[in-house]
Amino acid sequence: MLIAGNWKMYKGAEEAAAFCRELRDQLEWVDGVDVAVCPPFLALSAAVQALAGTDIAVAAQNVHWENEGAFTGEVSAPMLFELGVYGAIVGHSERRQLFGETDENVGKRAAAGLEAGLSIIACVGETEAEREAGQTEDVLRRQLSVLEQHDQLVIAYEPVWAIGTGKTATPDQAQEAHRFIRSLIDVPILYGGSVKPDNAGELLSQPDVDGALVGGASLEVDSFASICKAAAQ
Ligand code: PGA
């Protein structure tokens, strides 16, 4: 079971360090769940330092496919490694929708990150219009087609209509999509989209749900820690 907190564009270095110190205290006696936080690039180093000596991992929110070069605004896997970062999210729907990322470049980011030794959380998920048009499986198949099985790869199923909307997929909807994804690729599958302390237990008890990628509810230590504790049970 993996619980990852996607902080998006929240928390600078100072706030990240304070959050991580508090998180390590709250999770000190919690076993049976892998936990990761995904701060903005500029707060990664502070998070790595604050969590040194714990099992809580730090991952980035994106990674470029080249090691270096003329790619303004991008960050590479070796740069992340140098900081002690263990992995990266790729293909988040906000990257796809707001920053023009395509299946093709998501596949390149994932492959290069894995090649460099990072763990990769690759996000997939349909929009509301796609779900209503009965295209969920086609969209997932297309988004997954650029990803190859790897023991450091994790998929996050994040239906776009459930992200930041408070509209969580029902446990049955999540389970159905996860089972479909598992029929195409055999790696751990996280659910993401309005996961909160009060719905985490039920979502995480579905047979094909292997953890959660948490956005809004990962920004407060108490709510994130209580989701981690729910996963540990
Ligand atoms: P949310 O975001 O939990 O705020 O819906 C999830 C995500 O975007 O990863």
Image: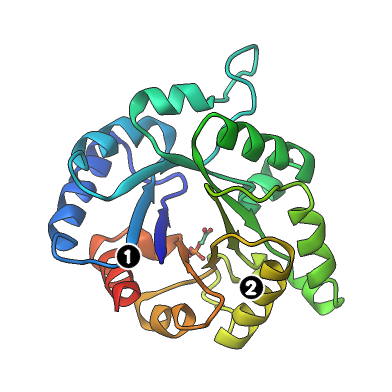
Left/right of residue 3 with respect to residue 77 in the rendered view: left
Q: Position of residue 132 (x, y in %)?
A: 81, 78
Q: Amino acid at mark 1?
A: Val
Q: Name the residue carrying label 1.
A: 33
Res 178 label? 2
Note whether ligand 1 is within 8 Å of mark 1: no
Image vertical order of residue 175 relative to residue 32, above or below: below
Label 2 or label 1, whichever comes before in sequence order? 1
Image vertical order of residue 129 relative to residue 220, above or below: below
| Mark 1, other Cα within 10 Å: few <14 / some 14–19 / many ≥20 | some
The part of the image, by quadrant, that contains residue 215 is bottom left
Q: Position of residue 189 (x, y in %)?
A: 56, 64
Disc 2 versus disc 1: distance between alpha carbons? 19 Å
Secondary structure, mark 2, is helix
Q: Position of residue 187 (x, y in %)?
A: 59, 59
Note whether ligand 1 is within 8 Å of mark 2: no
Secondary structure, mark 1, is loop
